[in-house]
Image (cartoon, grey):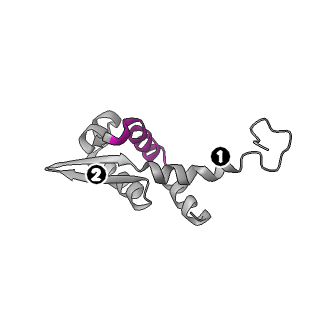
Amino acid sequence: MTLADIAKKMAAIGNETRLEVYRLLVRAGERGLPVTSIQQRLGVPASTLSHHLHKLIQVGLVQQERRGTTLICRADYTTMQQTFEMFASECCADDDTCNMNSK
């Protein structure tokens, strides 16, 4: 994943509402959540939620699946891991005194 890809994903979750949506979906696990459940939990209008979900889907952080008339959203855990892996793998890379350093 390039820095440009990571920047797009970070920009998508840089909005408070999208971050709340993403957090709910990460916590929900593989089963995901119906859009109506997300809307009820966050108390945002359907059109607003649709806009925010579209942004998260666009950058690959969220997947959506239709089950009959219900839209199920779930976090894409592979993309999440790849997005934040750079930070974990480079933690304290240039600091020999850092206790997070695995050297």
Residue type marked 2: Ser
Residue 20, how many percent across, how many down? Answer: 43, 40
Residue 99 sits in quarter: top right
Look at the image and tell me in which quarter the N terminus lies. Answer: bottom right
Q: In the visual, does 98 lie left or right of 63?
A: right
Q: Nearer the viewer, residue 81 or 34?
A: 81
Residue at the left extreme, as displayed:
68
- Which residue appears at 59% of the width and 65% of the height? 2
Q: In the visual, does 101 lie left or right of 19?
A: right
Residue type marked 1: Ala
User: Could you say which disc has been placed on residue 47 in the image?
Assistant: 2
Magenta span dominant secondary structure: helix
Look at the image and tell me in which quarter the C terminus lies. Answer: top right
User: Could you say which disc has been placed on residue 88 in the image?
Assistant: 1
Residue 35 part of the magenta-drawn span: no
Callout 1: SS: helix
- Which residue appears at 40% of the width and 57% of the height? 55
Residue 11, how many percent across, how many down? Answer: 53, 56
Circle 2: is it few (<14), some (14-19), or many (20+) Cα within 10 Å? few
Instruction: Tell me where the magenta segment starts and ends, as one range.
Output: 13-30
Task: Check the image and report above or below for 47 versus 29.
Answer: below
Callout 2: SS: helix
